[in-house]
């Protein structure tokens, strides 16, 4: 998988169950097995929706892409408590003042999202929120990044949905193969 992202105008919105950044212009794409998937948006879940060997982490970022024929590809990045995440740090003032209306936040560079690893897991699954569309190509970065407790709390406070968490429970594999891959996944590749 190769990334080819560009800085572009974006908005931020409290979706009721998560905080979503949506790019309003062409912010680039990823390429998986020769198919181009345009970057659309990203959002956060706490705790993580994916687990590694049964371990659930403090936060997960989903970076959502779509191909020209409507196929969805999502990159998932998990976080544990530690030093602040730089991408979230750049958005902190917008997150703290977020409302129910979509708010223009100017140019946002998706390359500021640090993946931190070339190794990743891939499987075909569904979206984690209704309508839980099937056939989604999931790519979960193996490296667990860090986020501060304050950043996670700011995301939860912004949503204020009355729930302690906005993550779907871990689902059974139901025979789905999960592949670990390394080659061709390069941080910052253009």
Image (cartoon, rainbow, N blue to C red):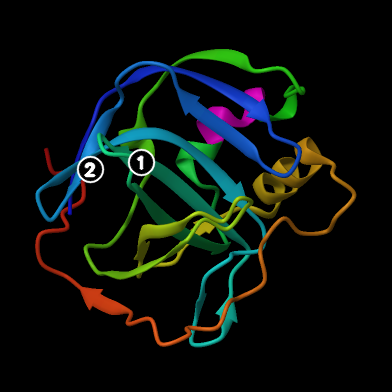
Q: Bounds of the magenta span?
A: 89-94
Q: Does the magenta stretch mainly form a helix, a strand or a loop?
A: helix
SS at badge 2: strand
Q: Quadrant of the C terminus?
A: top left
Res. 30 mark: 2
Q: Relative to the observer, which residue lies in front, 115 or 17?
A: 17
- Between the residue at mark 2 and the residue at mark 1, the CA separation in whole angstroms equals 8 Å
Q: Is residue 132 above or below residue 40?
A: below
Q: Give the crowd class for mark 1: few <14, some 14-19, many >=20 residues within 10 Å.
A: many
Residue 60 located left or right of residue 16: left
SS at badge 1: strand
Query: What is the x, y in percent for residue 78?
Result: 49, 62
Q: Residue at x 57, y 56 (%)?
A: 132
Q: Residue at x 31, y 21 (%)?
A: 7
Res. 65 mark: 1
* Quadrant in the rendering for residue 49: bottom right
């Amino acid at each position: 998988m190769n990334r080819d992202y560009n800085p572009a105008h974006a908005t931020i919105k409290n979706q009721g169950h998560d905080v979503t950044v949506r790019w309003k212009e062409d912010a680039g794409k990823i390429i998986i097995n020769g198919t181009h998937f345009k970057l659309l948006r990203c959002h956060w879940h706490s705790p993580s929706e994916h687990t590694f060997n049964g371990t659930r982490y403090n936060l997960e970022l989903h970076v959502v892409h779509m191909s020209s024929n409507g196929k969805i590809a999502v990159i998932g990045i998990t976080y544990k408590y530690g030093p602040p995440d730089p991408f979230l740090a750049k958005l902190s003032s917008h997150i703290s003042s977020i409302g129910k209306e979509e708010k223009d936040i100017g140019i946002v560079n998706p390359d500021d999202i640090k993946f931190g690893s070339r190794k990743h897991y891939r499987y075909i699954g569904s979206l984690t929120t209704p309508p839980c569309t099937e056939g989604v190509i999931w790519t979960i970065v193996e490296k667990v990044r860090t986020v501060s407790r304050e950043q996670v709390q700011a995301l939860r406070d912004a949503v204020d949905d009355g729930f302690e968490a906005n993550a779907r429970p871990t689902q059974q594999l139901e025979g789905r193969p999960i592949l670990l891959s390394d080659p061709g996944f390069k941080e910052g590749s253009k």
